[in-house]
Amino acid sequence: MKKIIHLSHRPCARVLKTGLTTRRLGYAVEFWQQTAREDFLPRFKHTQFFSDGDDLVERLHEAKPDLVYVHVCGAPELAALAKAGAGRRPVLCDIHDLDIMRFNTTSAYEESVFAIADALVFSSAGYETLCRRWKPAQVNVLPQTVVPPAMLPEDILAIKKLPKRPGIVYQGGISRNMPHRRMTGIVQRATAAGISVVVYAANGRAEDKSALINAGATVVTGYYYRPMLNELTRYDFGLCGCDEKNRALQQSGPNKFFEYAAAGIPIVAVNAGNQLKLAEGLNVGVSVEDIADIKNIDPRQFDGFGLVPTMLDYQDRLTELYRQLLS
């Protein structure tokens, strides 16, 4: 059985989804990371930690994986470290978030990802364009998707619907300094229209949370992935958006879009082009110019949640990519 190491700085939901799918394909999957979450680790027998770059390279030398799958988001330097530790074994890089998309700037580390990787996968059409520009012959498709319940160990993502709370929910990172995470204006407009906004902040400084609270939002922290999905079922709409148009949200395929869909709540897209196309194409959401417009939209009209792609929809493409890299 071929051994694949899923390498990440942190246990992002995308790491979980791709890892579960890879297991389903019959590969031995190990999760290696620097940081941990209580809801993530007990589900997997093979989870290891590395303390720094030198430790990671040494451990990879000893482990001798057949392939290393690098989740690039937030730590593009992992690509170079993986290649140093894997030697001649292939390194596949998952292009989920890059500064070149978020801020129109890039770093030597990010540029090195494209040079180092033996193959690239991506999370949206915008990221596909970027990947093909840099490495046209070695790109394959693995978009953000929902994990089907049939392949979930111990019902890790089993969703329990909770009593409703009318309003909008946002789940994810917040920051007034990052255009794609700046949304105090949206909160202010929603609050002025009498629409409740609850923010489940995955991260963010105290001043970022205070700004949202002052704008009228309720800010909640501390939920892990499984109970987070349960909480999402309470709300009328899940927000994908920011105050002003931004390249990242025009092009990306963020986790939150698919978490809302998994929870069965429609997406409302504001200044988020790619999410708009996905939401309307699947009939799981709508785009609005002004967040107050959702007062005139019935969330029950969206019935496409059973059509949201699962990781298994792309199993053949992923399998073929692994065959090419492992041959």
Image (cartoon, helix red, strand yellow):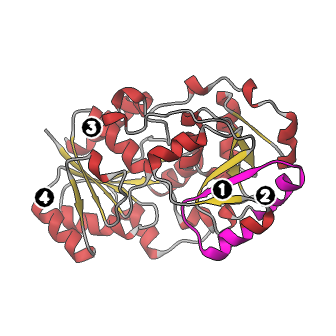
| Mark 4 and mark 3: Cα distance apart in space | 18 Å
Which residue position holds label 2?
187
Mark 2 and mark 1 in contact? Answer it, CB < 8 Å.
Answer: yes
Which residue position holds label 4?
63
Q: Is residue 197 visible?
A: yes
Q: Nearer the viewer, residue 222 or 179?
A: 222
Residue appearing at x 54%, y 51% in the figure: 127
Q: Nearer the viewer, mark 3 or mark 1?
A: 1
Q: Position of residue 192 (x, y in %)?
A: 89, 55
Dot 3 alpha-carbon crowd within 10 angstroms: few under 14, some 14 to 19, many 20 or more: some
Left or right: 38 with respect to 263? left
Residue appearing at x 87%, y 42% in the figure: 293
Which residue position holds label 3?
23
Instruction: Examine the image and state in which quarter residue 80 appears.
Output: bottom left
Q: Nearer the viewer, mark 2 or mark 3?
A: 2
Judging from the image, what secondary structure is the residue with disc 1 in?
strand
Q: Which residues are magenta?
A: 184-211
